[in-house]
């Protein structure tokens, strides 16, 4: 079992499927697993009554990794290494005392450049659903937002909309809305943006009216831990709407509030690309009519690009039509493929290193031999003829390779 207490764990409480052995077929998807038992947590020990679980959410770059590092004292992966690709929901332990551990759940944002929003929602859904089914509840959620953002738009707005639907109204009382990066703006400008967030209903206003609190993070250990302690002070745990809808109501992901929100966004995206594709096809017909082969070829590339985008959106929409059990199965399939890719890349890298080492050894031997020949030649040139006498003959002996010359006097 993954010992979360010791550091980062996989996006579920159990270990990821093992790397395939050399005699196993490639790309074989692992079977779906049952949710972990509570005893599978903390290295075989059930979570203690005082232990707590807090989800940390927000857009990429809002400071989630730094926040968790300040609390746990453990380095959090930043970016998308091969290791990070296998599990985009990680758990980190913060030992508040010998009798209490706080588990900080590091979640991805819905603006991940390496994963679609459907994949991100599916990963979060699997983690939250599995933990809820295992009677492991959240003490609260910390939602981070950069105060440096001039206005709420783009990925930040999309993240917030998804968060509201994922969380649900009942859980908002134990949500802390946190602004970060105050050292990068003036207090006056930061205060103006903070007020806009708090008093605009479509931003934070509605959540604040339902009980969410607003805090500033000073990017230091004491500030981070103070926010965690605030949530630990609540006597009750929360259940998000996504957990209730997936587990209690047994809905498919696209039937949940968060899934419906994402599906709506996907349909808008599909319409956008379909409209652009139609425009490009019109331009292609005109280029063909004008016998402009260069323009036609360029437009074909754009058409193919838009076609691929539409296909991806369609695939993401279909991927939302899974219930909890299927989500786990689909996740394990994705994980198996990613691990197979890692396995293949590792083998290729090992072979490349071996090949380079052999080349270096050959080159080193060649250089060593050339150096020895050069030194011998240098010493040969320094040797002088050595005269010697025997009777009436005088010999002059000089070394030149393996032969000698004698000169009679």
Image (tube, rainbow, N blue to C red):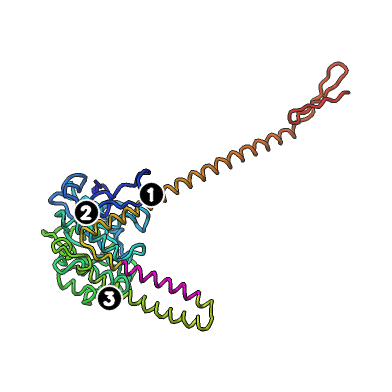
In space, the residues marked 3 and 1 are separated at their CA atoms by 50 Å
Residue that label 1 marks: 343
Dot 1 or dot 2: first in sequence order is: 2
**Is residue 373 rendered to the left or right of residue 66?**
right
Q: Is residue 307 magenta?
A: yes
Q: Is residue 337 above or below residue 160?
A: above
In space, the residues marked 2 and 3 are separated at their CA atoms by 34 Å
First to last magenta residue range = 297-315
Q: Residue at x 74, y 31 (%)?
A: 401
Q: Is residue 348 magenta?
A: no
**Is residue 287 rendered to the left or right of residue 162?**
right
Dot 2 or dot 3: first in sequence order is: 2
The spot of residue 87 in percent (x, y) is 30, 55
Q: Residues within 10 Å of mark 1 (few under 14, many from 20)?
A: some
Residue that label 3 marks: 192
Instruction: Check disc 1 and report its element: helix, strand or loop.
Output: helix
The spot of residue 355 in percent (x, y) is 51, 45
Residue that label 2 marks: 103
Q: Residues within 10 Å of mark 2 (few under 14, many from 20)?
A: many
**Residue 226 visible within the image:** no
The spot of residue 282 in percent (x, y) is 43, 82
**Is residue 269 rendered to the left or right of residue 35?**
right
**Residue 153 visible within the image:** yes
Q: Residue at x 17, y 58 (%)?
A: 138
Q: Nearer the viewer, residue 32 or 265?
A: 32
Name the front one of labels 2 and 3.
2
Instruction: Check disc 2 and report its element: helix, strand or loop.
Output: strand
């Amino acid at each position: 079992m993954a010992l979360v207490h010791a550091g980062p764990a996989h996006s579920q409480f159990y270990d990821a499927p093992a790397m395939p052995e050399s005699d196993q077929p490639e790309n074989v998807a692992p079977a779906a697993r049952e949710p972990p038992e509570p005893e599978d947590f903390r290295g075989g020990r059930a979570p203690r009554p005082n232990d707590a679980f807090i989800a940390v959410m927000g857009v990429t770059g809002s400071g989630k990794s730094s926040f968790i590092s300040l609390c746990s004292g453990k380095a959090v992966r930043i970016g998308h290494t091969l290791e990070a690709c296998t599990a985009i929901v990680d758990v980190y332990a913060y030992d508040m005392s010998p009798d209490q551990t706080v588990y900080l759940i590091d979640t991805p944002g819905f603006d991940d450049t390496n994963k679609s929003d459907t994949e991100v929602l599916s990963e979060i859904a699997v983690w939250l659903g599995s933990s809820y089914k295992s009677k492991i509840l959240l003490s609260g959620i910390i939602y981070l937002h950069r105060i440096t953002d001039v206005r709420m738009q783009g990925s930040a707005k999309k993240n917030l909309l998804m968060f509201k639907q994922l969380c649900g109204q009942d859980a908002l009382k134990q949500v802390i809305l946190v602004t970060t990066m105050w050292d990068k703006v003036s207090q006056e400008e930061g205060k103006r943006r903070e007020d806009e967030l708090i008093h605009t209903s479509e931003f934070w206003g509605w959540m604040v009216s339902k009980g969410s609190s607003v805090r500033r993070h000073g990017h230091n250990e004491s500030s981070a831990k103070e926010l965690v302690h605030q949530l630990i002070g609540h006597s009750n745990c929360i259940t998000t709407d996504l957990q209730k809808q997936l587990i209690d109501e047994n809905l498919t992901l696209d039937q949940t509030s968060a899934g419906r929100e994402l599906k709506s966004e996907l349909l808008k995206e599909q319409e956008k690309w379909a409209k652009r594709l139609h425009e490009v096809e019109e331009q292609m017909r005109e280029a063909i009519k004008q016998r402009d082969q260069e323009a036609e070829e360029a437009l074909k590339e754009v058409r193919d690009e838009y076609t691929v985008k539409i296909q991806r959106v369609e695939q993401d929409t279909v991927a939302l039509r899974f219930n909890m059990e299927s989500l786990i199965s689909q996740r394990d399939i994705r994980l198996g493929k990613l691990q197979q890719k890692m396995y293949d890349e590792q083998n290729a890298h090992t072979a490349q290193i071996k090949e380079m080492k052999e080349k270096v050894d050959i080159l080193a031997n060649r250089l060593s031999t050339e150096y020895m020949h050069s030194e011998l030649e240098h010493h040969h040139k320094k040797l002088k003829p050595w005269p010697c006498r025997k009777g009436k003959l005088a010999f002059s002996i000089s070394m030149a390779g393996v032969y000698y010359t004698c000169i009679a006097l």
